[in-house]
């Protein structure tokens, strides 16, 4: 689970090491990555919206 | 040949120049806090880009030269280097956020048009600007004053060629002035670089903007949205005054407006109406119906020798007061006062061989408008 989140965060940043990538592709389930990615993206959008609302005062 | 240090000297002196002033190739520093903030941001971001550019291209050209093929360089073959990759992702993020913070603060301030001391309605029209001092009973149009001879190249062009108007927008310094901006016909854009205002005026919408000018002076601008054949002939001139001077101007304007209102009640002589009418015609109507009333058919009908116009006074008045909906002929009931309408109608009925001998009195026009 934690390794899935870590991989999704790494994808968000755009940097991943090859060892982890090999491992994800051989052991991971696609569905887990997709769901985690959707959730993380939504959290990111909410975070940005929160900052914008706070800045607009 | 210049030595490297001489080049360096040239570059730094050019750089410091562009920092100190708006030079001819840079944007103006302007005369409002907002324009100064924008200029400051522009220069800061410019220098950030310069530094990044020098570093990136420096490393690149150095590597190209140092590890060139002819010296037997061999390409390294490795797959990744996570910490370097994280670093070169994180640094740009920090730089971008670092630039976004002051930029957003400036933007936020630019959009805050609240608590203004003075409200002015700016209306774009083909092809002039109309200014209305809300709550002060002052409204007028501002027309290009560059002469036709200059435009045709028949006389020498002056310093402010196509950037001069008959009546500038007059503003006080040190006061927050809010602009409510709209248009009567097509989209125009009110742009004065020194004030850092460039705002579209859109029919059916009211956009807001504001300025607080720090220095008295004359600031010029242009319509910045292609709006028809005379787009290049509707400049903007802002005359910023000391506050006391502005108050005096305001009083004078109000008195003149009262005088004008009184003029509605009295009987005007034909000579007076003709003289006034010619002024109005040349500044407002001639851009479409042309200087001698000859028009530009089929787009703009001739008024000189126009049978219907000569025979039907009532119809003629109606055209000018109410315009022609769906055509380019504007309604002048709100933009010209009764004296001006009476004068211009009298003028068109008696100029260029239209010898009807009719006069139209301002009182008659005022009555028609009230109906
Ligand atoms: Cu325009």
Image (tube, coloured by chain):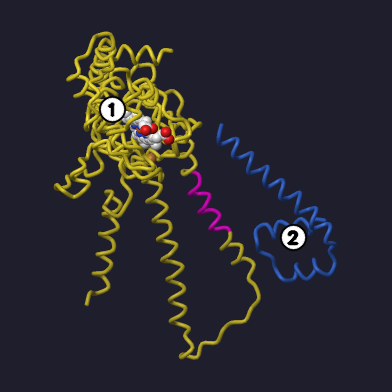
Identify the image quadrant of the N terminus of chain B.
bottom left
Q: Chain coloured blue: which letter?
A: A
Residue B228 visible in the snapshot: yes
Going by the picture, which residue comes out furthest to the left? Answer: B156
Residue at horizontal 33 percent and vertical 23 percent from the top = B336
Identify the image quadrant of the C terminus of chain B.
top left
Q: Give the label, 1 or 2, closer to the camera.
A: 1
The answer to which of B210 and B22 lies nearer the viewer is B210
Q: Chain coloured yellow: which letter?
A: B
Residue at horizontal 29 percent and vertical 55 percent from the top = B25
Which residue is under mark 1?
Answer: B170
Residue B180 percent location from the top left of the image? 43, 28
The answer to which of B231 and B311 lies nearer the viewer is B311
Mark 1 and mark 2, same subunit? no
Q: Chain of mark 1?
A: B
Callout 1 secondary element: strand
Queried on whether the Cβ of the residue with tag 2 lies below 8 angstroms from ligand 1, the answer reads no
Query: What's the mark number on residue A7?
Result: 2
State how far apart marks 1 and 2 are (Cα): 62 Å
Please provide the residue range marked out in magenta.
Answer: B90-101
């Amino acid at each position: 689970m934690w390794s899935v989140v870590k991989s999704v965060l790494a994808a968000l940043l755009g940097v991943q090491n090859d060892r982890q990538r090999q491992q994800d592709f051989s052991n991971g389930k696609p569905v887990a990555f997709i769901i985690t990615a959707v959730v993380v993206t939504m959290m990111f959008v909410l975070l940005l919206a929160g900052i914008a609302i706070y800045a607009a005062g | 040949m210049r030595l490297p240090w001489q080049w360096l000297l040239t570059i730094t002196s050019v750089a410091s120049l562009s920092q100190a002033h708006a030079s001819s190739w840079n944007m103006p520093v302007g005369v409002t806090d907002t324009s100064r903030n924008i200029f400051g941001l522009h220069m800061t971001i410019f220098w950030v880009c310069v530094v990044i550019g020098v570093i990136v291209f420096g490393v690149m050209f150095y590597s190209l030269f140092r590890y060139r093929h002819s010296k037997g360089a061999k390409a390294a073959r490795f797959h990744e280097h996570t910490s370097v990759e994280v670093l070169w992702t994180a640094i740009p993020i920090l730089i971008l956020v670092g630039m976004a913070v002051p930029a957003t603060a400036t933007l936020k301030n630019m959009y805050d048009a609240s608590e203004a001391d003075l409200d002015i309605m700016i209306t774009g029209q083909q092809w002039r600007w109309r200014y209305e001092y809300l709550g002060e009973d002052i409204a007028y149009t501002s027309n290009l004053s560059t002469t036709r001879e200059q435009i045709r190249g028949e006389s020498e062009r002056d310093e402010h060629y196509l950037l001069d108007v008959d009546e500038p927008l007059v503003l006080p310094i040190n006061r927050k002035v809010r602009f409510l901006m709209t248009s009567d016909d097509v989209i125009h854009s009110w742009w004065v670089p020194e004030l850092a205002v460039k705002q579209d005026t859109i029919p059916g919408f009211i956009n807001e903007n504001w300025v607080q000018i720090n220095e008295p002076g004359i600031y010029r601008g242009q319509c910045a949205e292609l709006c028809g054949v005379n787009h290049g002939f509707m400049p903007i001139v802002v005359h910023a005054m000391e506050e006391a001077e502005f108050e005096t101007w305001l009083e004078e304007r109000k008195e003149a407006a009262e005088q004008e209102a009184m003029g509605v009640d009295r009987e005007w002589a034909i000579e007076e109406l003709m003289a006034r009418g010619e002024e109005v015609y040349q500044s407002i109507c001639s851009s479409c119906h042309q200087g001698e009333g000859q028009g530009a058919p089929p787009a703009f009908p001739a008024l000189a020798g126009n049978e219907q116009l000569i025979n039907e006074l009532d119809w003629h008045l109606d055209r000018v007061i109410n315009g022609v909906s769906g055509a380019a002929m504007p309604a002048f009931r709100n933009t010209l006062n009764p004296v001006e309408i009476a004068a211009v109608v009298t003028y068109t009925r008696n100029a260029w061989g239209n010898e009807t001998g009719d006069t139209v009195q301002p009182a008659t026009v005022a009555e028609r408008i009230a109906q």
